[in-house]
Image (cartoon, rainbow, N blue to C red):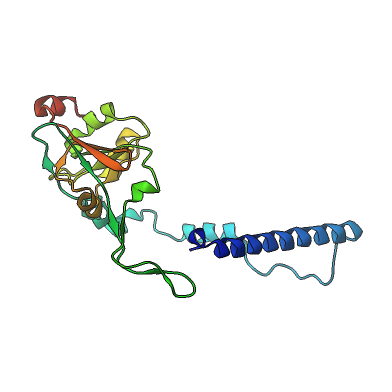
Protein backbone atom coordinates (compact mmCIF):
# COMPACT_ATOMS: atom_id res chain seq x y z
CA UNK A 1 0.00 0.00 0.00
CA UNK A 2 1.46 3.35 -1.08
CA UNK A 3 0.17 5.09 2.05
CA UNK A 4 2.49 3.01 4.25
CA UNK A 5 5.59 2.98 2.05
CA UNK A 6 7.35 6.30 1.24
CA UNK A 7 8.95 4.70 -1.81
CA UNK A 8 5.50 3.77 -3.04
CA UNK A 9 4.31 7.35 -2.72
CA UNK A 10 7.35 8.58 -4.67
CA UNK A 11 6.58 6.11 -7.47
CA UNK A 12 2.93 7.18 -7.55
CA UNK A 13 3.89 10.87 -7.56
CA UNK A 14 6.42 10.33 -10.38
CA UNK A 15 3.90 8.36 -12.46
CA UNK A 16 1.21 11.01 -11.90
CA UNK A 17 3.58 13.82 -12.89
CA UNK A 18 4.71 11.87 -15.97
CA UNK A 19 1.15 11.21 -17.11
CA UNK A 20 0.16 14.84 -16.51
CA UNK A 21 3.18 15.98 -18.52
CA UNK A 22 2.40 13.69 -21.42
CA UNK A 23 -1.24 14.82 -21.52
CA UNK A 24 -0.22 18.49 -21.38
CA UNK A 25 2.36 17.93 -24.13
CA UNK A 26 -0.15 16.19 -26.34
CA UNK A 27 -2.60 19.07 -25.92
CA UNK A 28 0.08 21.63 -26.81
CA UNK A 29 1.12 19.68 -29.91
CA UNK A 30 -2.50 19.33 -30.99
CA UNK A 31 -3.13 23.03 -30.46
CA UNK A 32 -0.05 24.01 -32.46
CA UNK A 33 -0.95 21.66 -35.29
CA UNK A 34 -4.53 22.95 -35.38
CA UNK A 35 -3.20 26.52 -35.67
CA UNK A 36 -1.42 25.63 -38.93
CA UNK A 37 -4.14 23.55 -40.57
CA UNK A 38 -7.50 22.09 -39.60
CA UNK A 39 -6.69 18.62 -41.00
CA UNK A 40 -3.64 16.55 -40.08
CA UNK A 41 -2.97 13.39 -42.09
CA UNK A 42 -5.59 11.08 -43.52
CA UNK A 43 -9.09 11.04 -42.07
CA UNK A 44 -11.88 8.46 -42.08
CA UNK A 45 -15.58 8.74 -41.15
CA UNK A 46 -16.56 7.41 -37.72
CA UNK A 47 -17.78 3.83 -38.12
CA UNK A 48 -19.28 3.36 -34.64
CA UNK A 49 -23.02 4.07 -34.26
CA UNK A 50 -24.11 7.01 -32.14
CA UNK A 51 -24.29 5.83 -28.52
CA UNK A 52 -27.50 7.69 -27.69
CA UNK A 53 -29.21 6.36 -30.80
CA UNK A 54 -28.21 2.83 -29.85
CA UNK A 55 -29.52 3.26 -26.30
CA UNK A 56 -32.81 4.68 -27.53
CA UNK A 57 -33.17 1.82 -30.00
CA UNK A 58 -32.63 -0.83 -27.33
CA UNK A 59 -35.02 0.94 -24.94
CA UNK A 60 -37.72 1.02 -27.62
CA UNK A 61 -37.51 -2.77 -27.99
CA UNK A 62 -38.06 -3.45 -24.29
CA UNK A 63 -41.48 -4.51 -22.95
CA UNK A 64 -43.60 -1.52 -21.87
CA UNK A 65 -43.76 -2.85 -18.30
CA UNK A 66 -40.50 -4.43 -17.16
CA UNK A 67 -41.82 -4.84 -13.61
CA UNK A 68 -44.09 -7.66 -14.76
CA UNK A 69 -41.04 -9.75 -15.63
CA UNK A 70 -39.79 -9.60 -12.04
CA UNK A 71 -43.07 -10.28 -10.24
CA UNK A 72 -44.47 -8.34 -7.26
CA UNK A 73 -42.03 -6.39 -5.12
CA UNK A 74 -43.08 -8.35 -2.06
CA UNK A 75 -41.25 -11.34 -3.54
CA UNK A 76 -38.01 -9.54 -4.44
CA UNK A 77 -35.18 -10.99 -2.37
CA UNK A 78 -33.28 -7.70 -2.63
CA UNK A 79 -36.02 -6.03 -0.57
CA UNK A 80 -36.09 -8.64 2.20
CA UNK A 81 -35.07 -6.93 5.43
CA UNK A 82 -33.73 -8.54 8.60
CA UNK A 83 -36.25 -8.99 11.43
CA UNK A 84 -35.89 -7.41 14.88
CA UNK A 85 -37.82 -7.62 18.11
CA UNK A 86 -39.74 -4.75 19.68
CA UNK A 87 -37.98 -2.48 22.19
CA UNK A 88 -39.74 -2.91 25.52
CA UNK A 89 -37.71 -0.27 27.39
CA UNK A 90 -35.45 2.68 26.74
CA UNK A 91 -31.80 1.69 26.79
CA UNK A 92 -28.48 3.16 25.65
CA UNK A 93 -25.47 0.98 24.93
CA UNK A 94 -22.23 1.22 22.98
CA UNK A 95 -20.62 -0.92 20.30
CA UNK A 96 -17.09 -0.83 18.89
CA UNK A 97 -17.45 -2.24 15.33
CA UNK A 98 -14.16 -4.10 15.17
CA UNK A 99 -13.39 -5.68 11.80
CA UNK A 100 -11.16 -8.74 11.38
CA UNK A 101 -9.38 -9.41 8.10
CA UNK A 102 -10.12 -12.78 6.53
CA UNK A 103 -7.15 -12.55 4.15
CA UNK A 104 -3.58 -11.20 4.12
CA UNK A 105 -2.89 -7.71 2.77
CA UNK A 106 0.50 -7.79 1.09
CA UNK A 107 2.87 -5.31 -0.55
CA UNK A 108 3.97 -5.73 -4.20
CA UNK A 109 7.16 -7.48 -3.04
CA UNK A 110 5.09 -10.09 -1.19
CA UNK A 111 5.75 -8.73 2.29
CA UNK A 112 2.69 -9.03 4.54
CA UNK A 113 1.47 -5.61 5.62
CA UNK A 114 -1.58 -6.75 7.60
CA UNK A 115 -1.99 -10.48 8.31
CA UNK A 116 -5.18 -12.48 8.17
CA UNK A 117 -6.89 -12.22 11.55
CA UNK A 118 -5.76 -8.64 12.15
CA UNK A 119 -8.52 -6.65 13.89
CA UNK A 120 -9.06 -2.90 13.81
CA UNK A 121 -11.73 -0.31 14.49
CA UNK A 122 -12.86 1.38 11.23
CA UNK A 123 -14.04 4.40 13.23
CA UNK A 124 -10.38 5.18 13.90
CA UNK A 125 -10.05 6.10 10.22
CA UNK A 126 -13.52 7.15 9.02
CA UNK A 127 -16.56 8.86 10.52
CA UNK A 128 -20.30 8.29 10.28
CA UNK A 129 -21.72 11.75 9.48
CA UNK A 130 -25.38 10.81 9.81
CA UNK A 131 -27.46 8.82 12.26
CA UNK A 132 -29.00 5.46 11.39
CA UNK A 133 -32.59 5.11 12.56
CA UNK A 134 -33.82 1.52 12.40
CA UNK A 135 -37.57 1.00 12.73
CA UNK A 136 -40.36 -1.42 11.95
CA UNK A 137 -42.45 -0.26 8.97
CA UNK A 138 -45.41 0.38 11.28
CA UNK A 139 -43.29 2.95 13.16
CA UNK A 140 -42.22 4.86 10.06
CA UNK A 141 -44.40 7.82 11.01
CA UNK A 142 -42.47 8.20 14.27
CA UNK A 143 -39.17 7.95 12.40
CA UNK A 144 -40.19 10.60 9.86
CA UNK A 145 -41.06 13.02 12.69
CA UNK A 146 -37.94 12.22 14.70
CA UNK A 147 -35.16 12.23 12.12
CA UNK A 148 -33.31 14.95 10.26
CA UNK A 149 -33.20 14.87 6.47
CA UNK A 150 -29.55 13.81 6.66
CA UNK A 151 -30.36 10.74 8.76
CA UNK A 152 -30.82 7.34 7.15
CA UNK A 153 -33.99 5.40 7.93
CA UNK A 154 -33.60 1.62 7.76
CA UNK A 155 -36.68 -0.61 7.78
CA UNK A 156 -36.77 -4.02 9.42
CA UNK A 157 -38.84 -6.96 8.20
CA UNK A 158 -42.38 -5.79 7.59
CA UNK A 159 -44.02 -8.39 9.77
CA UNK A 160 -46.64 -9.23 7.17
CA UNK A 161 -47.10 -5.74 5.73
CA UNK A 162 -47.15 -5.67 1.95
CA UNK A 163 -45.48 -2.25 1.59
CA UNK A 164 -41.74 -2.37 1.01
CA UNK A 165 -38.98 0.22 1.35
CA UNK A 166 -39.32 1.32 -2.28
CA UNK A 167 -43.09 1.74 -2.11
CA UNK A 168 -42.95 3.59 1.20
CA UNK A 169 -40.12 5.79 -0.06
CA UNK A 170 -42.15 6.73 -3.13
CA UNK A 171 -45.18 7.37 -0.94
CA UNK A 172 -43.38 9.71 1.46
CA UNK A 173 -40.91 11.25 -0.98
CA UNK A 174 -37.86 10.16 1.00
CA UNK A 175 -35.15 7.58 0.43
CA UNK A 176 -35.64 4.56 2.70
CA UNK A 177 -33.33 1.58 3.12
CA UNK A 178 -33.66 -1.98 4.36
CA UNK A 179 -31.83 -3.44 7.33
CA UNK A 180 -29.43 -6.07 6.01
CA UNK A 181 -28.53 -9.16 8.02
CA UNK A 182 -24.82 -8.28 7.99
CA UNK A 183 -25.56 -4.82 9.44
CA UNK A 184 -27.79 -6.37 12.08
CA UNK A 185 -25.07 -8.83 13.07
CA UNK A 186 -22.26 -6.29 12.88
CA UNK A 187 -24.01 -3.87 15.24
CA UNK A 188 -25.51 -6.55 17.45
CA UNK A 189 -29.04 -5.27 16.89
CA UNK A 190 -31.87 -7.13 18.61
CA UNK A 191 -34.79 -4.69 18.84
CA UNK A 192 -36.23 -1.61 17.13
CA UNK A 193 -36.66 1.32 17.13
CA UNK A 194 -32.98 2.01 17.67
CA UNK A 195 -30.96 5.11 16.81
CA UNK A 196 -27.29 4.63 15.94
CA UNK A 197 -24.78 7.47 16.02
CA UNK A 198 -21.02 7.78 16.30
CA UNK A 199 -19.54 9.03 19.54
CA UNK A 200 -15.78 9.23 19.30
CA UNK A 201 -14.48 5.86 18.13
CA UNK A 202 -17.58 3.89 19.10
CA UNK A 203 -21.22 3.67 18.11
CA UNK A 204 -23.93 4.63 20.55
CA UNK A 205 -27.17 2.65 20.19
CA UNK A 206 -30.30 4.20 21.72
CA UNK A 207 -33.20 1.75 21.92
CA UNK A 208 -36.58 3.49 22.20
CA UNK A 209 -39.77 2.13 23.70
CA UNK A 210 -42.78 3.53 21.85
CA UNK A 211 -46.36 3.89 22.95
CA UNK A 212 -47.85 1.49 20.39
CA UNK A 213 -51.34 3.00 20.55
CA UNK A 214 -50.05 6.49 19.77
CA UNK A 215 -47.63 5.14 17.17
CA UNK A 216 -50.37 3.34 15.26
CA UNK A 217 -52.65 6.38 15.45
CA UNK A 218 -49.98 8.77 14.14
CA UNK A 219 -48.43 6.47 11.57
CA UNK A 220 -49.45 7.58 8.03
Residue in front for this viewpoint, 218 or 156: 156
Q: Is residue 97 left or right of residue 213?
A: right
Residue occupying the point 86% across, 61% down? 33
Q: Is residue 84 left or right of residue 61?
A: left
Residue furthest to the bottom in view is: 110
Residue 116, located in which quarter of the rendered image?
bottom left
Task: Tell me residue 113's x, y (percent).
Answer: 41, 66
Q: Is residue 198 above or below residue 106?
A: above
Residue furthest to the front in view is: 6
Residue furthest to the right in view is: 36
Task: Tell me residue 3's x, y (percent).
Answer: 50, 58
Task: Tell me residue 78's x, y (percent).
Answer: 27, 55
Residue 131, located in which quarter of the rendered image?
top left
Task: Tell me residue 201's x, y (percent).
Answer: 32, 43
Q: Is residue 22 above or below residue 152?
A: below
| Image quadrant in which the C terminus is located | top left
Residue in front for this viewpoint, 99 or 136: 99
Residue 219 visible to an observer of this rendering: yes
Q: Is residue 38 left or right of residue 186?
A: right
Residue in front for this viewpoint, 167 or 203: 203
Residue occupying the point 61% across, 62% down? 10
Residue in front for this viewpoint, 138 or 72: 138
Residue 193, located in which quarter of the rendered image?
top left
Residue 38 visible to an observer of this rendering: no
Q: Is residue 198 above or below residue 181?
A: above
Amino acid sequence: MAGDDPRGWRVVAFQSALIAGLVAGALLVAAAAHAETSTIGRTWPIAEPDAMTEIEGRAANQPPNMAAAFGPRSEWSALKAAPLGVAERDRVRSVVPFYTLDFDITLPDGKILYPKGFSFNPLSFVSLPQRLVIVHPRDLGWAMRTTALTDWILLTDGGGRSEDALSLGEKHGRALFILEERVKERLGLTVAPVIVRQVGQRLELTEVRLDRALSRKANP
